[in-house]
Image (cartoon, helix red, strand yellow):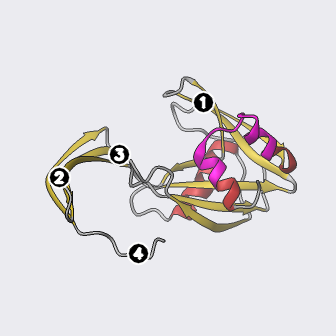
Amino acid sequence: MTDMPAPTINTSDVRTTSFGDWISVDSRTVQLAGRQSMETHVVRFPAIALIVALDGDDLVLIRQFRFPPQSWVIEAPAGRVEPREDPARTAVRELREETGFQAGQVELAGTLRISPHLSDETTYVYAATGLVPGPAHPDKGEFIQRFMVPRGDVRAMVREGRIVDAKTIAALAVCDVI
């Protein structure tokens, strides 16, 4: 249903609040055709690139300490696409930084909108094979542990609530891992 025409929207009173150098929130008054005006908020967040990396029958995942939930979260390697950076380059860079693996082959598997009700963020999902191990170099402030999971165990990890990160679960589905 994405080919439906967008409704007529009148926008006014746009205010932007920035948080750091890469997140902002737009607050605005909108009126859809024939409806009352309402206030909406959009989190402006840069695109991210996520990479589903398979080494034979094993999947490369990370445990990353995330400050908002104050817990370790199992995820696929991912990171922010820098301005004017090709998302494929971001995916390869993040795989190397967070896991140490170099990818032999990288292919775009799909694009996702994880929270379209709240954010304009796009997630580019890449599949990687032909992995060559090496040392990881996480960014300052990242607490990451790389680990391997047999592909056949991933679905159970999702069902048991061990993998709860929505972008990772969606990417695993796009790449036919679950």
Kind of residue sitting beneath label 3: Trp
Kind of residue sitting beneath label 4: Met
The answer to whether 99 appears left or right of 59 in the picture is: left
Task: Measure the C-alpha gap from mark 1 to mark 3.
Answer: 20 Å
Residue annotated with mark 1: 143
Question: How busy is the neighbourhood of tag 1: few (under 14 within 10 Å), some, or many (20 plus)?
Answer: some
Task: Measure the C-alpha gap from mark 2 to mark 4.
Answer: 22 Å
Q: Which mark is residue 4?
A: 4
> Of circles 1 and 4, which is in front?
4
Residue occupying the point 62% across, 45% down: 97
Q: Find numbered disc 3 in the image and state the secondary structure of the residue it sits on.
A: loop
> Of circles 3 and 2, which is in front?
2
Up-down relation of residue 139 to residue 60 (above or below): above
Q: Position of residue 12 (x, y in %)?
A: 13, 56
Q: Main secondary structure of the magenta part?
A: helix
The answer to whether 115 appears left or right of 27 in the picture is: right
Task: Measure the C-alpha gap from mark 3 to mark 2.
Answer: 29 Å
Question: How busy is the neighbourhood of tag 3: few (under 14 within 10 Å), some, or many (20 plus)?
Answer: few
The answer to whether 29 appears left or right of 54 in the picture is: left
Residue occupying the point 47% across, 55% down: 81
Residue occupying the point 75% across, 61% down: 176
> Of circles 4 and 3, which is in front?
4
The answer to whether 153 appears left or right of 81 in the picture is: right
Q: Nearer the viewer, residue 96 or 57?
A: 57
Residue annotated with mark 3: 22
The span picked out in magenta is: 155-170
Question: How busy is the neighbourhood of tag 4: few (under 14 within 10 Å), some, or many (20 plus)?
Answer: few
Q: Residue furthest top?
A: 70
Kind of residue sitting beneath label 1: Phe
Indicate which disc, 1 or 3, sits on the residue closer to the N terminus. Answer: 3
Q: Nearer the viewer, residue 35 or 93?
A: 35
